[in-house]
Image (spheres, helix red, strand yellow):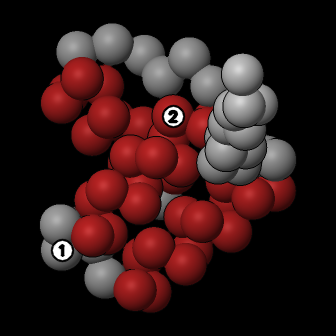
Amino acid sequence: MLAELTKRFQQVKKCEPLHVNELLDYLQKSYIYGELSIVEYKKIYSELDRLNAEKPKSFEFAAI
């Protein structure tokens, strides 16, 4: 399933994903837009989790 997601990423973005985190972002967007079922989402998310994919930490801005 991860291979299918990667192929769709390549077709849409016209480039290779540089990191598994890009695939995680694409997976979440695809699920939100109804392109994937919850079952597909969970299976692919599990694969990405094993590859240590993660969302970026939020930025903290110090007051000046």
Quarter of the image for residue 41 reads bottom left
Q: Amino acid at mark 1?
A: Gly
Residue 1 in picture, x, y percent from top left: 48, 59
Callout 2: few (<14), some (14-19), or many (20+) C-alpha neighbours within 10 Å?
some
Label 1 to label 2: alpha-carbon separation = 18 Å
Rendered residue at 75%/59% (across/down): 49
Q: Does residue 28 appear in the picture of this structure?
A: yes
Residue 28 or residue 41, whichever sits in front: 28
Residue 50 in picture, x, y percent from top left: 81, 56
Q: Is residue 38 left or right of residue 31?
A: right
Q: Which residue is mark 1?
A: 34
Secondary structure under the numbered disc 1 in the rendered image:
loop
Rendered residue at 28%/59% (across/down): 30
Is tag 1's residue or tag 2's residue first in the polypeptide sequence? 2
Quadrant where the C terminus lies?
top right
Q: Is residue 46 left or right of residue 42?
A: right
Q: Which residue is mark 2?
A: 22
Q: Amino acid at mark 2?
A: Glu
Q: Does residue 3 appear in the picture of this structure?
A: no
Q: Which numbered marker is on residue 4?
A: none
Residue 24 in picture, x, y percent from top left: 53, 49
Callout 1: few (<14), some (14-19), or many (20+) C-alpha neighbours within 10 Å?
few
Q: Is residue 43 left or right of residue 53?
A: left
